[in-house]
Amino acid sequence: MQRVTKGANTIVPATIIQPSVLFAGGSADVSAYILDGTGKVRGDEDMIFFNQPATGDGSVSLSGANFTIDLSKIAADIERIAICAVPEQGTVADLKRIDLEAPGVVAFSQDTAGMSEAAIIIGEFYRRGGNWKFRAIAQGFNGGLAPLSRHFGIDVADEPAASAAPVPAPSKVDLRKQRIVSLEKRDPKLVSLAKAAAVSLEKKSLSGATAKVVLVLDISGSMYDRYQSGEVDRLVQRVLALGLNMDDDGSIEVYAFGTGAYRIGTADIDTYQDFVPNMLRTHDLEGSTHYGATIKMIRQDFASQPDFGRVPVYVMFVTDGDTMDRSLTEKQIREASAQGIFWQFMGIGGSGLFSSGFKFLEKLDDLKGRKVDNCDFFSVPSADSYTDAELYDKLMSEYPGWLKAAAAAGILP
């Protein structure tokens, strides 16, 4: 039996496999999603969970937290079987550790400390070169069973209120628009920003388009005044509004860089107002500026996700100065040009006695040796310089063209 770590894969040497999932703390509902080449289920019958414990053809069944999978019965158009879990209470962190073991095939353990998500994609069995393999994923997912199921293509209706009157069958809705409408009274400012972002997306024929939105923040010491003035807080809010329109989770992943590279966490409608102060409590401003390690970290993190290469990743990278690791940064951007990640660099400031401006970012924007042009750059005196509409228009300036180029190059479907 092969023991693997997060991100690793191994050959599956058996036809009938019996993966079991155990938790060191708490309890969770496990599920399996049987996915075709689009990364989606073919229909509701391809979701195996406590309410539907087996497929009609007997290829996948579930008893408690124990699966039986007969690979010889898996239809030819199926490419992956994703194994997931949703804690019955709390978050993934409350499970403490997840162990997946298929006797004679594979074993995988993952500590879950610090994982604030409400669901997790543990791993997947997938076809590759005529063989079946297993990949350890351990990717947290915001939302519970219903959002997780929607992510894999299941049309899950919210439970209706109790009523004596017959309830019509639910119609398929745009969850992102529904989420924005539900915020009207709770956070009108964020709703206003989301609507401004929606207008810019519509102008670029991107209304309803899906992407994972990432924000990368400069925490070098020269950013001090921008953090103190609230400029960065306002930028987080504006980028989150873009995420509400583009990201199925309605959230954005935030990274930071200075001398080092850091995964900060997820900003969403519940956390964004205190996100920057909380970040600064655990990450001091640092004495230098290095882009490369953070770009590499983002590439590695998203490459391990099951929908990588199908759902584009939009990265907004914010800095007030050029990097000190130019060779590494160029190398990472060139290599990333063959991946489904778009890099939008925004320089803020860049003038003054001790500033070198953004000559390197200007060069990066036109970097040679890439499979496709995968980045854009613009600079502004302040993150507040543009109106909301102007900022969103600027952020969408080259992204639509990249989507077309990436599809033509086979990088995205």
Image (cartoon, rainbow, N blue to C red):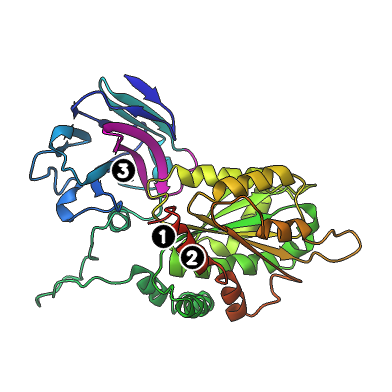
**Crowd around label 2: few <14 · some 14–19 · many ≥20 (10 Å):** many
Callout 3–callout 2 Cβ contact below 8 Å: no
The amino acid type found where label 1 is placed reads Asp
Kindly check if marks 1 and 3 are in contact, taking CB atoms under 8 A apart as contact. Answer: no
Please give the residue where the numbered disc 2 appears in the rendered image.
243
* Residue at figure coordinates x 76%, y 47% from the top left: 286
Q: CA distance from mark 3 to mark 2?
A: 25 Å
- As rendered, which of 187 and 218 lies closer to the eye? 218
Counting residues from the start of the chain, the first of labels 1 and 3 encountered is 3
161, above or below 101, in the image: below
Horizontal side of residue 103 vs 91, given as left or right: left
Numbered disc in front, either 1 or 3: 1
Magenta run includes residue 82 = no
- Measured as percent of width and height from the top left, residue 124 is found at 31, 38
* Dominant SS in magenta: strand
- The amino acid beneath tag 3 is Ala
Q: Position of residue 353 (x, y in %)?
A: 91, 62
Q: Quadrant of the N terminus?
A: top left
